Amino acid sequence: MKKPQKPSEQQAAIFQFFTEIDIIKQLSSALLNKTLPDGLHVSHFAVISHLVRMGDGKTPLEIANVMQVTKATMTHTLNVLQKRKLIEVRANPKDGRSKQVFLTPAGQQFFGKAIGMVIAAYQPILAKCDVPQLLSTLPALQALRKILDENR
């Protein structure tokens, strides 16, 4: 069996870069789960956030694809949000076989409330950070996300 090649310094640094992003994602998701109101989870918040950012009228399958989960998983997530009256799932007027997802006024209020709670939870962490330096990384992270999104 051939011995694996040792990565170059740049390859090791790139691997460490993505490892740091992954760890930050895990830790921030745990904080978000502890912070979200009404016992909702990151997966629920992600759907609401997506509808706020991208607009209403997406099909459950479109949302599942964006979230990279199965349609069954998305159906469960949407059912939780619908029971809490944060979204409405309506028949698609252009295609009677499919549905569309819409944020309700309660869902919009929930989003605003959740953002406020999350920002408050991050305050002790941000007090220990160089916030301008963090924000200066945003364009590079957005560019990387766009490239990853285009290549999934």
Image (cartoon, rainbow, N blue to C red):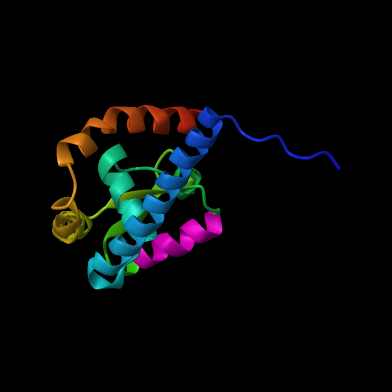
Q: Is residue 136 above or below residue 93?
A: above
Q: Quadrant where the N terminus lies?
A: top right
Which corner quadrant of the image does residue 34 belong to? Answer: bottom left
Residue 152: tell me if it is visible: no
Residue visible at 51% across and 60% down in the picture: 73
Q: Could you tell me residue 86's position as x and y percent?
A: 26, 61
Residue extending farthest bottom: 39
Residue visible at 19% across and 47% down in the picture: 129
Which corner quadrant of the image does residue 82 belong to? Answer: bottom left
- Whether residue 107 sits left or right of residue 60 in the image: it is left
Q: Tell which of 63 and 132 is nearer to you.
A: 132
Q: Could you tell me residue 23's position as x and y percent?
A: 42, 52
Residue visible at 37% across and 51% down in the picture: 24
Majority SS type along the magenta span? helix
Residue 10: tell me if it is visible: yes
| Residue 84 counted in the magenta span | no
Residue visible at 55% across and 54% down in the picture: 70
Q: Tell which of 25 and 81 is nearer to you.
A: 25
Q: Tell which of 51 and 102 is nearer to you.
A: 51
Q: Could you tell me residue 60's position as x and y percent?
A: 45, 50
| Residue 78 counted in the magenta span | yes
Q: Quadrant where the C terminus lies?
A: top right
Q: Could you tell me residue 121's position as x and y percent?
A: 18, 61
Which range of residues does the magenta coloring cover? 71-81
Q: Tell which of 35 and 65 is nearer to you.
A: 35
Residue extending farthest right: 1
Q: Tally the numbered discs.
A: 0
